[in-house]
Amino acid sequence: MSEPDFTAEFPSETISEGKVKALVPKLEAYKKQPCDYAPSKAPVFYNPVMELNRDVSVLAFQAYQRLLDREISICDALTGSGIRGVRYAAEIRGVKKVVVSDINERSFKLAGHNVHLNRLQDLVEVNHKDANCLLSCHGAPHMRFDIVDVDPFGTPVPYLDSAFRALRNKGLLAATATDLAPLCGVHAKACIRKYGGKPLRTEYCQELALRLLAGYIATVAAKQEIGVRILFSHSSDHYIRVYAQIGYGAKKADASIKSLGYVLHCFNCFHRETANAVSPRFFEKCPECGSKMSWAGPLWLEKIFDIQFCDALAEENRRTPLRNSRKITKLLSLAKSESEAPTTYYVIDQISDKLSSAVPSVSTMLQSLRDNGFQAVQTHFNTRGIRTDAPAMTLQKLLQKAVATA
């Protein structure tokens, strides 16, 4: 079927990403002032910074397809320029169908053009619908998807309920959140309102943000008697991303809810601990320094990286050379190493600042902790961050010792 005549009614350019070409808004035309965020000013949403997000998604969905060992269907209900869905159809082997949609008429037309540009009209169905309407229309048992990708500008919260309805048993939900100000505690009331959990402005707030999102995903799924297992997640640039496999059944939903809890934090000595339920400990003093404790949650306390899935992602990354392959290799290596490490991480610079001390290198602190019998690994959340089972006060003493002997 030939493509209907298409002419972009706005400044645009053709770019290459992965194995596809796509016509996208020329973002320079929409940046009038230095503070302008061009992707949101353009008539069709397109963000080149999210290429890493799309690259990891391609690898994750391919790894998931290999686990299922059958053809899969994918839904991108907030498609924008269509580049995400087009890449899924062009780059993932074993794809039976990709459904993309956008309520924006210009997005709908541009996505359709990009599908034809890459000759994928037999694989990709383009819709002009509201995301929740599209997902709800695929809620019947034989119409559901294997993968639903919720990648909005802002919060994924309004779409998660219908996303779960549109997923088959053992399906995969991929959800992105770019509203990090609420999730990281800058706008705490907004976080409580949207995600049903209290955030904290700590040095590890990106991890808390991701766990708040994962916890909300588990809560929404449980309402439909669906359990979740987090296969992979990451924090990059201005967003967080969670990949959750679902399982039908009340028992699985109950198990997911049991994975929720709280993080207790002392802003004086950096002590932190987890709690599975609200208890008197919330109102007790810090066990290390005696100061008042603060808390975040409810949020996801279980693993946010699955080692086997990290290995599968790494294998796909080796098979599929992408522009961000080196970044992804480092991301997966760090995620795998921290998958078995304690919840939350310490930032060396933060502790040094508190102690008015010189700042030792991360490698020095890692070695010092290991030499003293503690677990210590780096984290992808922060290049200066360390996950360790060492008590906060012990970590401070080791840091002072490392500086004194340097």
Image (cartoon, rainbow, N blue to C red):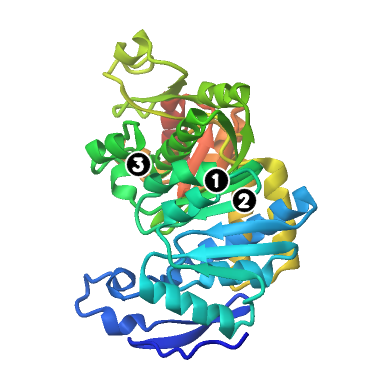
Q: Residue 144: horizontal and vertical position, in percent?
A: 61, 49
Q: Identify which residue is drawn at 34% across, 49% down.
A: 180
Up-down: is 35 above or below 298? below
How many callouts does the rendering have? 3
| The N terminus - image quarter | bottom right
Closer mark to the observer between disc 1 and disc 3: 1
How far, Cα to Cα, is label 1 from label 3?
A: 48 Å
Q: Identify which residue is drawn at 36% across, 12% down.
A: 281
Q: Identify which residue is drawn at 63% across, 53% down.
A: 332
| Secondary structure of residue under mark 3 | helix
- Residue occupied by mark 1: 139
- Residue occupied by mark 2: 143
Q: Residue 356: horizontal and vertical position, in percent?
A: 29, 39
Asked if marks 1 and 2 touch (Cβ < 8 Å), the reply is yes
The one of 160 and 360 positioned closer to us in this rendering? 160
Asked if marks 2 and 3 touch (Cβ < 8 Å), the reply is no
| Label disc, if present, on residue 369 of the rendered structure | none
Image position of 362 (left or right of 202): right
Q: Residue 384: horizontal and vertical position, in percent?
A: 45, 48
Residue type of the residue flagged with mark 1? Gly
